[in-house]
Image (cartoon, grey):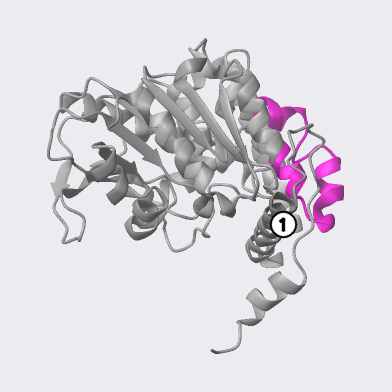
Amino acid sequence: MGRLPKSVYGAVVHPQEIHDDDVPLPVNRGPLAMTSRGVGALVDRALLTLMKRPSMYPSDDDHQRVRRETRAAFELFQRQGWIDDPRSAHATPPPLKHPAVLHPRSRIPGLEQLVFESQYRLHPDDPSATRWRDRPRNRTAHAWVVRHPEPDRPWLVCVHGLGQGHPRIDLRAFEAARMSKQHRLNLIFPILPLHGARRDPQVPIGGLLSYELVDNIHGLRQAVWDVRRVMSWIRLQGADRIGIYGQSIGALVSSLVAAMEPVDMALAGIPVCDVPSLFRIHAPHELRTQLDDGTFLGDEIRALYQSVCPVEITRTVDPMTRFIFAGLADRVSTPSQAQLLYEAWGKPDIHWYDSGHVGAFWTPSVRRYIDNALLTLGAP
């Protein structure tokens, strides 16, 4: 076995410190549970260390530019009424009627690829409109489809997490083959903006959550727009029952979509809910002064991010159709994010498991919880 790359070795030996939540949670103090939480937290911190490279920190020039863009965006949002009514920042997209449908070679039966123009547009006065338009790959949207042989089966929209957006990763993360066979579901996997085939070379992996604070809002709003268009296409396929399941940042997008579209079931896994709060938790010590001076996480930023916060725009929902799972030792999205969504959704069923963010993908109780949630959708 070869030696670990230096960056990986450093992440394991000197994992990233973060500022823990002060959220009271149910805790199993048995030795196995405590070990699972310890291992899960260590894996998460190592992942964070790999993600938080100093080369990704903003320079002084970036800091000043973001300050100007934030002020201009805030003034625009005020004029448009989006500060007072965050939901109004999301226009209703046109229905998706005729996407290109490709049939790639795959081991998964019934796999298709949808390709279509996003048609998402920024307001011409937006301070980063030109930069956003200069990402041609992002203008073309993609989605992977796994059809069940029985066409009248329910549909599940699966929204991936940060840095994903590749079929081999996404279909495995959502256990597409098992979902299709065991639960007899039609599945669709939209690709988020700036991810996978939509990521232009100059955009870093994970560019949907970066110090480009105004761009992050556009990316999340476009994600909601694109997923809603995908859902319109599903309905044109004759779907009469639709669920949505998001992981991590995909759970934030899913929660926003569920606030705007009728869904029969919504499942938020290891969710992100309040982006500014998450930035503060993960801020390296080198950026603390910049954060605390109000430029990056001041009142204007918090007001802007209301339009992409499920807490601010969630409509009254039936808690019996909402489900959340979250890790007690999650050091990536953190327990407080799940708690915020739990409160916004009217305290629905929630499963706290004994591991971290990444640990969700190997924890048996999480799989059982997902299976039980899908019963609400009519599966199997």
Q: Horizontal and vertical percent for residue 337?
A: 66, 34
If the image is split into quadrants, where does the N terminus sit? bottom right
Left or right of 313 in this view: 368: left
The foreground one among 188 and 97 is 188
- Residue displayed at 70% across by 70% down: 11
List the residue tagged with mark 1: 35
Residue 86 at x, y percent in the picture:
57, 19
Quarter-of-image position of residue 206:
bottom right
Mark 1, secondary structure of its residue: helix
Magenta stretch encompasses residue 291: yes
How would you classify the magenta stretch by its main secondary structure?
A: helix
Q: Nearer the viewer, residue 269 or 256?
A: 269
Q: Point out the stretch of residues depicted in magenta.
A: 277-304
Question: For the C terminus, which image quadrant?
Answer: top left
Is residue 137 positioned above or below 79 on the image? below
Along the viewing direction, whichever of 136 and 61 lies nearer the viewer:
136
